[in-house]
């Protein structure tokens, strides 16, 4: 059973309920699509005894987290284990920020780790706030002096969005719904937030100097709670776990395009760009079946099966 999915470069990283991590090269040397994804496995590593709950890749490193709180760093080229850490609860999210992986668990701990050591740690459930980090992403925003600053944006499941640095909260932005997913465009110019009410928001810096304020601008609404957002070069994909449906919102026009899927999506990961198209790998709700979602430029989207 597939329990986590991520991508980077030409590789697709798959986590399983048995604690295994598989690295597959989705494209053959001839740049043609594979017939069976697992025929292209470059390496496999039995990382933990519990189900893999989180996979993230940055540069030459892969971070894997499991349901027992184990965090393992692997070499992306070989699968060799580099470092191992223990958290208090199930690992729920990870993002690359300031040369470290920022990783969080189910009971409110946030760690900054790399292949050498634990750089810092912080508990987010202090002061009576909810402890569960529901979503987290590294983002960049302009400050009051028009300087580009990097933060880790996170939601703890309540009605606020936090901007943090090494676990310290620098800004609290009230929201009307729990933020379930955060995503940023490739160039960092736009930041999107998905809500449990089915609304897609954009995080904006409005004003200058002392009048600078952060706002969540309502962009679109879909008929299901948003559980994850996924960026392509031209669109943001909105996914839920209750309906066999995806929506693609064009970055240029904010127009929504629905895409029917055989089942509700469980996981998505971006694939290397194809000629005049962007592809996403989709794991269906049975957590065993793969499909490829193709978003051609200027034409309708389509869903294709991928054998596994």
Image (cartoon, helix red, strand yellow):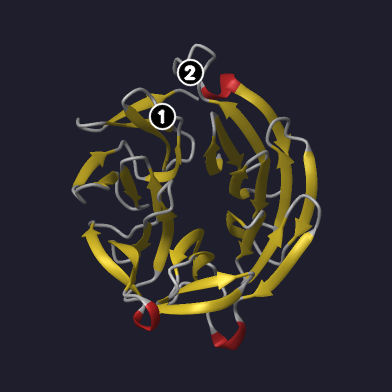
Label 2 CA crowd tier, 10 Å (few <14, some 14–19, many 20+):
some
The residue positioned 56% from the left and 77% from the top of the image is: 169
N-term mark: 2 or 1: 2
Whole-angstrom CA distance, mark 2 to mark 1, is: 15 Å
| Residue 237 vs residue 116, the one in the foreground | 116
Q: Position of residue 240 (x, y in %)?
A: 35, 52
What residue is shown with label 2? 34
The residue positioned 68% from the left and 73% from the top of the image is: 122
Instruction: Tell whether 158 sits left or right of 87.
Output: left
Residue 124 in sight in this render = yes
What residue is shown with label 1? 273
Q: Position of residue 22 (x, y in %)?
A: 63, 33
Instruction: Tell whether 232 sits left or right of 27.
Output: left
On the rendered image, what quadrant is the N terminus found in? Answer: top right
Q: Residue 60, labelled with which disc? A: none
Q: Position of residue 286 (x, y in %)?
A: 44, 40
Q: Are marks 2 and 1 in contact (CB under 8 Å)?
A: no
Element on which disc 2 rests? loop
| Residue 68 vs residue 252, the one in the foreground | 252
Q: Is residue 164 above or below residue 128?
A: above
Where on the picture, by quarter, is residue 262? Answer: top left
Residue 47 in sight in this render = no
Instruction: Tell whether 198 sits left or right of 113.
Output: left
Element on which disc 1 rests? loop
Number of callouts in the render?
2
The residue positioned 32% from the left and 28% from the top of the image is: 277
Q: Position of residue 179 (x, y in %)?
A: 40, 67
| Residue 182 vs residue 126, the one in the foreground | 182
Q: Is residue 105 above or below residue 14?
A: below
Label 1 CA crowd tier, 10 Å (few <14, some 14–19, many 20+):
some
- Outermost residue toward the bottom in this view: 127
Q: Is residue 260 above or below residue 219?
A: above
């Amino acid at each position: 059973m597939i329990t986590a999915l991520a991508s980077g470069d030409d590789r697709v990283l798959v986590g399983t309920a048995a604690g295994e991590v598989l690295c597959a090269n989705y494209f053959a040397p001839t740049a043609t699509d594979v017939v069976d994804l697992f025929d292209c496995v470059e390496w496999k590593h039995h990382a933990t005894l519990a189900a893999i709950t989180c996979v993230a890749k940055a540069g030459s490193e892969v971070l894997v987290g499991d349901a027992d709180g184990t965090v393992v760093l692997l070499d992306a080229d070989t699968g060799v284990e580099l470092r191992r850490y223990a958290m208090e609860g199930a690992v729920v999210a990870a993002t690359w920020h300031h040369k470290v992986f920022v990783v969080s668990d189910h009971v409110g701990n946030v760690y900054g780790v790399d292949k050498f050591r634990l750089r810092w740690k912080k508990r987010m459930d202090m002061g009576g706030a909810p402890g569960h980090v529901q979503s987290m992403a590294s983002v960049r925003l302009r400050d009051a002096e028009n300087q580009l600053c990097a933060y880790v944006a996170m939601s703890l499941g309540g009605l606020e969005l936090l901007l943090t640095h090494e676990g310290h909260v620098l800004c609290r932005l009230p929201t009307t719904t729990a933020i379930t997913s955060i995503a940023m465009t490739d160039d960092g110019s736009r930041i999107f937030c998905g809500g449990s009410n089915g609304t897609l928001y954009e995080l904006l810096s409005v004003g200058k100097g002392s009048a600078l304020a952060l706002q969540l601008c309502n962009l679109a609404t879909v008929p299901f709670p948003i559980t994850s957002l996924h960026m392509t070069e031209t669109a943001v994909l909105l996914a839920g776990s209750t309906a066999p449906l995806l929506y693609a919102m064009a970055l240029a026009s904010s127009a929504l395009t629905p895409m029917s899927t055989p089942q509700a999506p469980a996981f998505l990961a971006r694939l290397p760009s194809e000629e005049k198209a962007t592809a996403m790998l989709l794991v269906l709700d049975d957590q065993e079946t793969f499909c490829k979602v193709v978003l051609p430029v200027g034409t309708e989207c389509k869903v294709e099966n991928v054998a596994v």
